[in-house]
Amino acid sequence: MLVKLGGTPATKPKSPRPSSSATPRPNRPPAEHKPLPEGVVIFDNTRLGDFKSGPRTFYYKHIRNWVPEGEARAALTGGIAWSVAMDALWVEMCGGTNLPDVRLGDLGWDAFCQAWVGEGLEHPDTLDAEQYREFGAYSPNNYYEMLLHYVVARRDWLAQLELVGVELPVVVPLPGVEAPGKTVLYGARIDKVMREGEAFKWVDHKTTAKGLRGGAGFQPFWLDQWTPNSQADGYSYAIAEAYPGQAEGGLIDAALVHRESHDVFTLLPQYPQDAMLEAWKAQVSYWASLALDEMRLLEELRSSGKIYQSSYMPLFPCDGSKCAGWGSCPYRDICRSHPNPERLDAPPSGYVEEKWEPFSTVDHEQFGAAELQEAEDFRGGGK
Ligand code: SF4
């Protein structure tokens, strides 16, 4: 069995202002980062989801590393920044804190703004009223109000939790997935792992603007999508492997993003049975095997040079159902004019090269040589 949990230690950071309860981060040099060794392939929910929704999408995004230019959308950025704010709040609030609600709100807001700017958007403090309006429901001031309400809504519950870790990278083997010369793993980054009573659980923070009229709650179809859900089941599988007999699935910690309602939160428990997790593993292995087959064929056709002579690319086909319509595919412009994108040396106009690599530069101290050596052993049949 290979399961590794790394990530940020659940240590309270220094509060921006004096705090009687805050503990400074341990004083240690910056962790060494390094890419994954040659031959290690990690499928995560994004890669598998892209392959399932359209193999050609997978090819553009994960083989060629092409993404549409300027995709800094407010919804995406807000979700990322909310998640970073949650990190700051959970580290401070789990196990109890002496900070008053408004100071906790500031703590979350500082972290939110830092992440917002880090994603390439202007600092919320410098936006004018018109710019705020343009963000609609995803306006930063809505998130600020949400943070203040979140602190009040979650204070008592978080006080009784033990935070085990934040942003934990987890890798598990995918049995039955064969790829000569490659080590194939499933990977996930879990927002939080915590202990409630004796049980270890994962927590994933989600935001959505899909609310009922007037922000009176979440739309039922949005709530419904989490059971079953491949990402959530992957977390449950990983945590069950990491804490045998002590894990109890996890929770989606959902927050509604809305112009008027800022206090709509819910916890969605995810406690899949063992048989469901086995089914999840089989499905993930199936889709990973299909993706690997296409990748192997591509390598062969590239080596022989045949792929460059063909007028079209005979690999990674989509079924066409997601090309157009609501939420249409961002790769349509390439598909419309390049039947064989293998003939392109660089991304076409409107696209840039940007690798999706949540695991290739993870903290070496936490997910490094020793773990990957285990992966090698696993590939060699040693486990
Ligand atoms: S435009 Fe259609 S065929 Fe092309 S990548 Fe998107 S979904 Fe697939």
Image: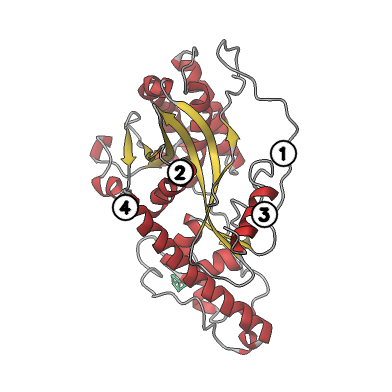
Is residue 258 shown above or below 51? above
Q: Nearer the viewer, residue 128 or 362?
A: 362
Sequence-wise, which precedes: disc 2 or disc 1? 1
Could you say where residue 257 lies in the image, as x and y percent from the top left? Answer: 37, 37
Please, what secondary structure does the residue beneath circle 2 have?
helix
Sequence-wise, which precedes: disc 4 or disc 2? 4
For label 1, the residue is 31
The residue most toward the front is 382
For label 4, the residue is 228
How many C-alpha atoms fall within 10 Å of the one at disc 3: few (<14), some, or many (≥20)?
A: few
Query: Marks 1 and 3, how far apart in space?
Result: 19 Å
Is residue 100 shown above or below 67? above
Q: Quadrant of the C terminus?
A: bottom right
Please, what secondary structure does the residue beneath circle 3 have?
helix
Amino acid type indicated by mark 4:
Pro
Q: Classify residue 117 by image quadrant.
A: top right
Amino acid type indicated by mark 2:
Ile
Residue 351 is at least partly visible in this image = no
Query: Marks 4 and 2, how far apart in space?
Result: 17 Å
Query: Marks 2 and 3, how far apart in space?
Result: 21 Å
Query: Marks 1 and 4, how far apart in space?
Result: 37 Å
For label 2, the residue is 239
Q: Nearer the viewer, residue 79 or 349?
A: 79
How many C-alpha atoms fall within 10 Å of the one at disc 4: few (<14), some, or many (≥20)?
A: few
Disc 4 to disc 2: CB gap under 8 Å: no
